[in-house]
Image: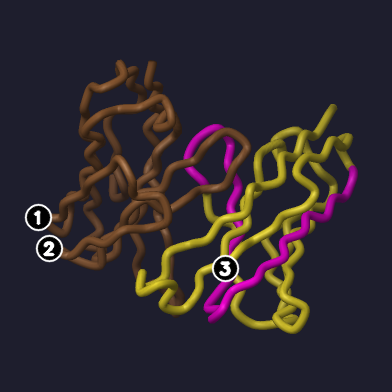
């Protein structure tokens, strides 16, 4: 069964800290891995990763994929209170049960950044 | 504004009632999805559609039905609401953009069944 496991499930840090969120997956046929940020509403897209070892960056956020070890990390440096959210990792398999590529989500990591 | 529009944003249903969650996108995307998200959980796929007239079950389809008569609309129907259907429902569409698939999510419908 295809699955995505995120860790930790929750994390509390102080402003200025650096955090690393983990996502491991087991997928029969891998197409891509996506990271989303969710703040009490719809998930908003952060990164899409398809190739190992290529870091994606956006401001203080960065992510990398390891297709050999089947995991990805999301790093946030110099955290701010506005980074408080649930971070979702999702994998898009190729032809998942004939579904033409829906997303398989992990449970998310709830990040709380204290002032 | 272009995107995925869901209505209503909130709804309380009594057990056994029925309702339709509306989802409309104006981006001409063929692929559309309905997910539900329970507290502390990721999103689980209910139904999906790869184009008008074509729908199929996802991971958790029981208690739901969908239709796709047009490219724009993908309504989700609950026939006999049960407390287990209390959840937040997200509609999404997918397109091929800039060399990869991009997902656009609606703002969600928070449903409570009492």
> Is B21 displayed left or right of A41 in the figure?
left
- Neighbourhood count class around disc 1 (C-alpha, 10 Å): few under 14, some 14–19, many 20 upward: few
What x and y, as percent, mark residue A115?
84, 27
What x and y, as percent, mark residue A14?
88, 35
Which stretch appears magenta?
A17-43
Mark 2 to mark 3: distance in Å? 29 Å
User: Is A23 inside the magenta-drawn segment?
Assistant: yes
Q: Which chain is brown?
A: B
Q: Nearer the viewer, mark 2 or mark 3?
A: 3
User: Is A21 inside the magenta-drawn segment?
Assistant: yes
In front of the other: B80 or B8? B80
Reply above or below: B97 against A8. below
Name the residue carrying label 3.
Answer: A1
Reply above or below: B87 against B104. above
Name the residue carrying label 2.
Answer: B53
The colour scheme used here is: by chain
Q: Nearer the viewer, mark 3 or mark 1?
A: 3
Name the residue carrying label 1.
Answer: B69
Task: State which quadrant residue B97 falls in.
Answer: bottom left
Question: Between disc 1 and disc 2, whose residue precedes?
Answer: 2
The shade of chain A is yellow
Taking the spot 63% from the left edge, 48% from the top edge, the residue there is A107
Q: Secondary structure at mark 2?
A: loop
Query: Do callouts 1 and 2 point to residues on the same chain?
Result: yes
Taking the spot 34% from the left edge, 17% from the top edge, the residue there is B12
- Neighbourhood count class around disc 2 (C-alpha, 10 Å): few under 14, some 14–19, many 20 upward: few
What x and y, as percent, mark residue A15?
86, 36
The answer to whether marks 1 and 2 mark residues whose Cβ atoms lie closer than 8 Å is yes
Mark 3 to mark 1: distance in Å? 32 Å
Chain under disc 3: A
In front of the other: A5 or B99? A5
């Amino acid at each position: 069964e295809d699955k995505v496991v995120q860790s930790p499930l929750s994390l509390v840090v102080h402003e200025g800290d650096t955090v690393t969120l983990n996502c491991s997956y087991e997928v029969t046929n891998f197409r891509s891995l996506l990271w989303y940020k969710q703040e009490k509403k719809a998930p908003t897209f952060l990164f899409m990763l398809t190739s190992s070892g290529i870091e994606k960056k956006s401001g203080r956020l960065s992510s990398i994929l390891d297709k050999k070890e089947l995991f990805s990390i999301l790093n946030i440096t110099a955290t701010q209170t506005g980074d408080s959210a649930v971070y979702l990792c999702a994998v898009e398999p190729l032809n998942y049960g004939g579904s033409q590529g829906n997303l398989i989500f992990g449970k998310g990591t709830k990040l709380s950044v204290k002032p | 504004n272009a995107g995925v529009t869901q209505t209503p944003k909130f709804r309380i249903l009594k057990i056994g009632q029925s309702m339709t969650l509306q989802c409309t996108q104006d981006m001409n995307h063929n692929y559309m999805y309905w997910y539900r998200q329970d507290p502390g959980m990721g999103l689980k796929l209910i139904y999906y559609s790869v184009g008008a007239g074509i729908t199929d079950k996802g991971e958790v389809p029981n208690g739901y039905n969908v239709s796709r008569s047009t490219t724009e609309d993908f309504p989700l129907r609950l026939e006999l609401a049960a407390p287990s259907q209390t959840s937040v429902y997200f509609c999404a569409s997918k397109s091929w953009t800039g060399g990869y698939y991009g997902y656009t999510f609606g703002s969600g419908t928070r449903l409570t069944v009492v």
